[in-house]
Amino acid sequence: DLVPPQTALEIDLLVGYTAQIVVDGWPIADATFVEGTGVYRWAPSPSSPTIQEWTPGLRTVSITWDTYTGLPNPGSYEWSFRVG
C-alpha cells in the first residue's frame, strides 16, 4: 500500500497482551500503549529516538506479542508499505 508521510501505526491486540514493535530494524520504545484496550500507537516525530520522519520508500513493520498474564500465547506478524 502507498501511504502519506504523516501516517501513524496502530496495533490492536487483545487485552492482556503486550507487543514488541520493530520498524525497518529499529525497536520502537516510544509507542503509546493503552492497557485497557490493548492498542499501541506510534508515528515518527522529531522527538522520537529512532525514526524522526517517514522517508519515501518501502517500510517494514514487525511485531511479536505474548500475554503478560496467564498462559503464554506468543505470535508474530510482519507487513510492508510504501511511503509516497
Image: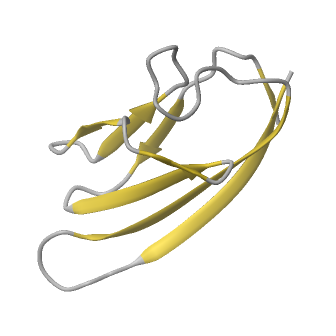
Q: Is residue 73 left or right of residue 71?
A: right
Q: Is residue 46 left or right of residue 83?
A: left
- Image coordinates of residue 54 in percent, x first then y, are 70, 24
Identified at 85% across, 25% down, the residue is: 56
Does 69 sit above or below residue 29?
below
Query: Residue 53 occupies which quadrant of the picture?
Result: top right
- Image coordinates of residue 57 in percent, x first then y, are 87, 33
* Most foreground residue, 15 or 65: 65
Count of numbered circles in the view: 0
Which residue in the rendered view is the most extreme toward the front? 49
Does 48 sit above or below residue 36?
above
Which residue in the rendered view is the most extreme toward the bottom? 71
Does 62 sit above or below residue 45?
below
Identified at 55% across, 24% down, the residue is: 44
Q: Is residue 11 left or right of residue 79?
A: left
Identified at 58% across, 30% down, the residue is: 51
Quadrant where the image shows the C terminus: top right
Quadrant where the image shows the N terminus: top right
Q: How is the image coloured?
A: secondary structure
Q: Is residue 54 left or right of residue 75?
A: right
Query: Residue 11 occupies which quadrant of the picture?
Result: top left
- Image coordinates of residue 31 in percent, x first then y, are 37, 36
